[in-house]
Image: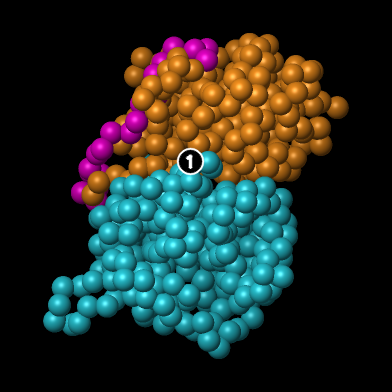
Amino acid sequence: MSSIAIIDYGMGNLHSIKKAIQHVTDDTVQVTADHDVIMSADRVVLPGVGAIRDCMGEMRKQGVADVAMEAAKSKPFLGICIGMQALLSHSDENNGVACFDLFPGNIHHFPKKIDDQSGELMKIPHMGWNQVTQNGSHPLWANIPQDSRFYFVHSYYLPTDNFAHTVGSCHYAAPFVAALAKDNVFAVQFHPEKSHTVGLQLLENFTQWNG
Amino acid sequence: MSLAKRIIPCLDVRDGRVVKGVQFVDIRDAGDPVEVARRYDREGADEITFLDITASSDNRDTIVHVVEQVAGEVFIPLTVGGGIRCTDDIRRMLNAGADKVGINTAAVFNPEFVKEAADKFGSQCIVVAIDAKCVSAESEPKKWEIFTHGGRKGTGLDAIEWAQKMTDYGAGEILLTSMDQDGTKVGFDLELTAAVSHAVSIPVIASGGVGNLDHLVEGITKGHADAVLAASIFHFAEYSVEEAKLHMQKHGIEVRL
């Protein structure tokens, strides 16, 4: 039987993601900060909510930053929300925070924008169900219809411009990367664990993916 | 293609049962919260909100068990409000599987609590619940005041200013209930909803007064809400969540189907 490690750095609600993964697999699912458990797991999930400075800071403080990066370079790896943003070079949040730099790119705050249809200022955070366009095929998109709605909640985004690893895109005030992938890494801005059937399908696909 | 407007069924839970009363009297039993949540999930609810109205603190744990059970099988965002007074309360709800908590009275008595909570858990999980009542005379410009204790106690706080202050303090969303309309089934207070929605940069959930599906449409088109919350029209199976969404779509509102 395979095992999945969800990296715990003391932030956010990891129970949701654990429960959702357990719902789609009989694999062992552990929420852990233990270096050995993470490195011996077959698959690793880096979740995240809240602000990027606290997220990066806590990962370093809890000593999981290095092991997270090791895992991202060596085994099937799923980043979620801030867990995706942390993989980029830099985020503008909290007056600028250096991230893992696994992918070149900068995370920006959504611009203040008037909605074309309603003529109203678009609310931030981008919160709710929005459509994700799959840019090309990927094993993690298996059995998920094109333009399915996933649940998002975020104020910062990765622009699609000049980003080479987009596999899913979305639009809110600006076009942004909803999913990125390269080699053994897949990372999403939305919350699959809160995205009903399509989210569960993505998690199930991850449990069967060998990177 | 754009962000869908959300429909959020709300379950008022007392001592482990879903209840519904008209303006807090004449309470009717509406079933087992886990069963009800399952049904809403099947019907396509975008989120589910639990409002714990248990009077005695002895029975506070019942809501935790309800959330735990629902979170194990319903994979959409879950919000829990009622009795959230300290960061330990928030932690307990998040650990049970909630994604957001609604802070109401505690915010009024200690606004710093909202700041502390947003700092600690992130704005995305802090919903500030505002219960407002119109206090202006008919000839005057409209004015709404924050009320606590189920609409019985005035606070002197202006609802619009309060919503802005809570946004500044780190709220991720506002759940706005009109105490004048709540339970009346005559529709949202659309003026109040539009005034608050235009005054803040964060999403606003309209609540209080839904009696039919047109009311949900108005909440979005005239109240300019980002989401609409309703309880009794769904509890007693007058309408399903799916019917509500189809109705909204028919009126040109983007929904998730």
Residue B67 to residue A29: above or below: below
> Looking at the picture, how far across and down is residue B97, in whole percent?
65, 49
User: Which chain can be seen in orange?
Assistant: A
Amino acid type, residue under disc 1 in the picture: Asp
- Callout 1 crowding tier (Cα within 10 Å): few <14, some 14–19, many ≥20: some
How does the figure colour the protein chain or chains? Answer: by chain
Q: Looking at the picture, tell me which residue is in the foreground, A167 or A67.
A: A67
> Looking at the picture, how far across and down is residue B30, in whole percent?
63, 77
- Quadrant (top left/top right/bottom left/bottom right) for the C terminus of chain A: top right
Residue B109 to residue A38: above or below: below
Indicate the quadrant where residue A42 lies: top right
Residue at 57 percent across and 50 percent down: it is B87
Residue named by callout 1: B119
Residue at 25 percent across and 55 percent down: it is B198
Chain for numbered disc 1: B
Q: Colour of chain B?
A: cyan
Residue found farthest to the right: A1
> Which stretch appears magenta?
A100-119
Residue at 40 percent across and 28 percent down: it is A94
Residue at 58 percent across and 44 percent down: it is A194
Q: Is residue A10 magenta?
A: no
